[in-house]
Amino acid sequence: MIILTNKDVINRVAKNIFKANIFPSTKDLIDETEHVIRKNFPDISESMDSRHHSKLFKRIKAKLLEKLRGMRGGIASRVKSAIFEIFGESQLPRIDFQSSPAEINSWKSDQRVKDAYRKLFDVFSEDRTYVQVILERVWKSKKRISNMHIAWGVAIAQLFLNPDVKGIMISENLLKKQIKINFRKLQQKRPLRPEEGELDAEETSEEESEEEEEEGKSPKRRKTSRGHVPSSGRAPSPGLVSPPLTSPSRLLPEFFDNESEGRQRAREGRRESRRQHSQEGWRESRQRSGEEEGDTTGGDTERAEIVVEQ
């Protein structure tokens, strides 16, 4: 007898969707829940109609969102830990995440923090930059990682150390903006080193996140200044997704160098980038990747490498 448990469904849905969509919408989650049941529990699925699926999703929704928040928060914590490990205390003083605002402001103002931020895209060793080594440390157990996860990990490191961003927790809207910038650069094969004014110039997403729907918070009512930071591990808006990788090549250093080539293409690429990030793109990526392919949330496989889409 096959037993369908809430925990099993939640774990499968979270694992599958997190491969390509860090911050899914309600519709994404509903679709993936039905997909998981159809594929893994066909006998049960045959006896379920739309009402049964709706009831099941309502029953697991809160726990599913909690699971996804935990996955995002776990990666964010690992990025920050890797930053301190790579730089070392001589280059980057430690900061307690329970520190007072005054202590955090003092840490952000420290010249060593500013220097670490500037060094993120400098060569660390063997033609690998600091940020590249940081990401390899975070995802060392994975054979592949999508462009979206690369963009996300780099964004966390950038905003955590950026002296112009107040606090050490990262606001959802600010993180989304930085991820969009990074993802677009990866798609266009441009260097990831920040360009002057790019974060201020980036449009804020008007799409409402699943957590905002759940908590009754509309992004139009929330301040998006650089200072206020309610979340540490949130990720991009629902439509921003990356198809699975098809080539296991290394994350190339040129994505992290200091060249400004291609700057004029940024505006032109935004519209095309948004189209590529559509819901249809996510569905196609899920079909191509398949459920059994390894996820990118961190695991125990040794000697993995960060790769970039070709």
Image (spheres, rainbow, N blue to C red):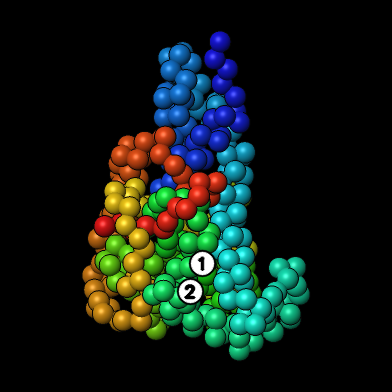
Question: Is there a contact, CB below 8 Å, between mark 2 and mark 1?
Answer: yes
Give the x, y percent position of residue 179: 43, 64
Instruction: Tell me, for residue 151, which label it has, or none.
Output: none
Instruction: Give the number of marks.
Output: 2
Residue in view at x 41 percent, y 58 percent: 306
Describe the element under mark 1 as helix, strand or loop: helix
191 left or right of 41? left
Identify which amino acid the numbered label 2 is placed on: Tyr
Quarter of the figure with the C terminus: bottom left
The residue that disc 2 covers is 130
Q: Is residue 226 above or below residue 209?
A: below
Give the x, y percent position of residue 283: 33, 41
Front position in the image: 228 or 114: 114
In three-dimensional space, the C-alpha distance between marks 2 and 1, rounded to whole angstroms, equals: 6 Å
Residue in view at x 73 percent, y 71 percent: 96
91 left or right of 240? right
Identify which amino acid the numbered label 1 is placed on: Ile
Describe the element under mark 2 as helix, strand or loop: helix
Q: Is residue 77 above or below residue 123?
A: above
Quarter of the figure with the N terminus: top right
Front position in the image: 129 or 112: 129
**In this rendering, does residue 19 appear at all?**
yes
Give the x, y percent position of residue 105: 68, 81
**In this rendering, does residue 18 appear at all?**
no
Instruction: Tell me, for residue 134, which label it has, or none.
Output: 1
Label 1 neighbour load within 10 Å: few <14, some 14-19, many 20+: many
